[in-house]
Image (tube, rainbow, N blue to C red):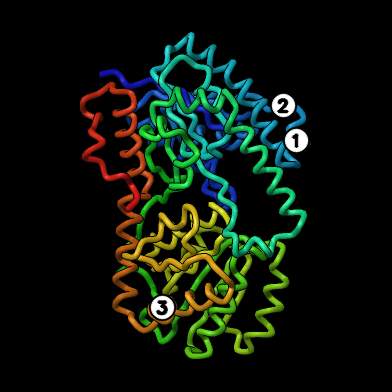
Amino acid sequence: MEKLKILVSAYAFHPRAPKWIGHRSGYTSWKLVEQLVRFCDVWVMTTNQNRDPVLESLSEGGLPEARIRFVNLPKFHKFLRRSFSGQYLCYFLWQRSALEEARALHSEHQFDAAHHLTPGPEWFPSFLGASLPIPFIWGPLLEDEGIPKSLRRFQSNRLNIKKSWEQTVQRWARRRHARKKCAQNSRAILVSDPDTVEKFPKVDRKKIHFFPSYGIDAVSSLSKMKSSREKNVFRAIGAGNLTRESGFFEIIRAFRRFVQSHPEADFALFGNGPEKNRLERQILRMDRQGRIRIHPPNEMESMRKEMHDSDVFICPVVSQDESVWVIEAMAAGLPVIGVDFGGRGMHIQDKWGVKVTPGSSKDMQKDIVHALEMLYKNPKTRLKMGRAAQKNAKENYVWERLGNKLKRIYGEALLQDEDIRFSRKGEERFFY
């Protein structure tokens, strides 16, 4: 049987693994296209800004089965990207050009379906989905969930005004005809967190599949890791954007209380941000023994090595980006302590993690200390949770597994092949 012809829209599309968590969308698109070419004929539209790294990778043998079309960004895109509104105006203008290219390609190749692939916000429509007269796959989609109410008091007035403006734009965009039509025309909608489901009408929710916005290449064996579990040291690790509302102040204060009872413990925090200097000053006042350290954001490979020498990962609060580190920590065999908020609450389950309820600063510190005490006093439980975390990462986040899941979704949505079609009744809905 002939392969399906799929037209992919990938605004962000990059062949190199990101060095830090904030640059993963393009790499996710690339890795998912690598999976699509296993069972489809794929044409990819991306921005001309990605031309050099993409062509370099193609010359080295990357994506040999995919056809790449570069669509120009507006000439003044660098100016537009300076603001939130400008970024999405740039995205809007690129999508309009990409739609013209898509129509020309479709008249030539007669695609079986289109897929808007780059992970992005659920409130911004895909022009392909709203306008092309062919089956459409949308996502993975994200929601800009903000932060828990208990931590919003730490945001500056300027940031509150900015967030308020962004939320106004998002509410307006959800009411637009193009966004509604995009959802109506979709055969499958891929979302990465449960809160996004609520942003769609009930009639469209039956099309939704949970699908992560990030994956991993492989999972190492715990037996091959050099782990601090074999030492007389209890090491915790965290990573993220160092802002006041991130929850890192609460994490550091909680760990200081923990260290008072367990002076052999230490905490390594990797990250950067506007509150880094303030956090460092607080650590100098609180931690005379140097058990808490802030490191610059290393490359991801170095960060993974540091994880393999730790006992527990403590997840911050703020954004979807930090959920990436939950997945990386699970792949490294670490139990995860995280705030039960937004998409992270879905990644962290009792088998391999401890959820902290968002609340007052004192309550969060108390819960974090309690979780650290439990994991410290029960090394067998810690190891069991680490193995469960790795098992979950291996079964649900490895790129090849995600490709198989995507294949099943295509089979159901497009009803093209009995070998890849499946029943919803028998499917495990990805997250536990």
- At numbered mark 1, what does the secondary structure look like: helix, strand or loop? helix
Dot 3, how many residues are within 10 Å of its Cα: few (below 14), some (14-19), or many (20+)? some
- At numbered mark 2, what does the secondary structure look like: helix, strand or loop? loop
Q: Which amino acid does label 3 sit on?
A: Ser
* Spot occupied by residue 363 in the image (x, y as percentages of width and height): 53, 75
Q: Which amino acid does label 1 sit on?
A: Leu
Going 61% across and 34% down the picture, which residue do you hit?
50
Q: What residue type is labelled 2?
A: Pro
Dot 1, how many residues are within 10 Å of its Cα: few (below 14), some (14-19), or many (20+)? some
Label 3–label 1 contact, CB within 8 A: no
In primary-sequence order, the first of circles 3 and 1 is 1
Residue position marked by numbered label 2 in the rendering = 74
Vertical arrangement, residue 412 with respect to residue 396, above or below: above
* Spot occupied by residue 83 in the image (x, y as percentages of width and height): 74, 41
Nearer mark to the viewer, of 2 and 3: 2
Frontmost residue, 376 versus 186: 186
Frontmost residue, 366 versus 315: 366
Vertical arrangement, residue 219 with respect to residue 69, above or below: below
Label 2–label 1 contact, CB within 8 A: yes
Frontmost residue, 355 versus 7: 355
Vertical arrangement, residue 18 with respect to residue 239, above or below: above
Going 62% across and 38% down the picture, which residue do you hit?
170
* Spot occupied by residue 204 in the image (x, y as percentages of width and height): 41, 31
Vertical arrangement, residue 289 with respect to residue 204, above or below: below
In the rendered image, the quadrant that contains the N terminus is top left
In primary-sequence order, the first of circles 2 and 3 is 2
In primary-sequence order, the first of circles 2 and 1 is 2
Residue position marked by numbered label 1 in the rendering = 80
Q: Cα distance, mark 2 to mark 3?
A: 51 Å
Residue position marked by numbered label 3 in the rendering = 228
Going 53% across and 17% down the picture, which residue do you hit?
131
Task: Tell me which corner region of the image, top left, top right, bottom left or bottom right, holds residue 419.
Answer: top left
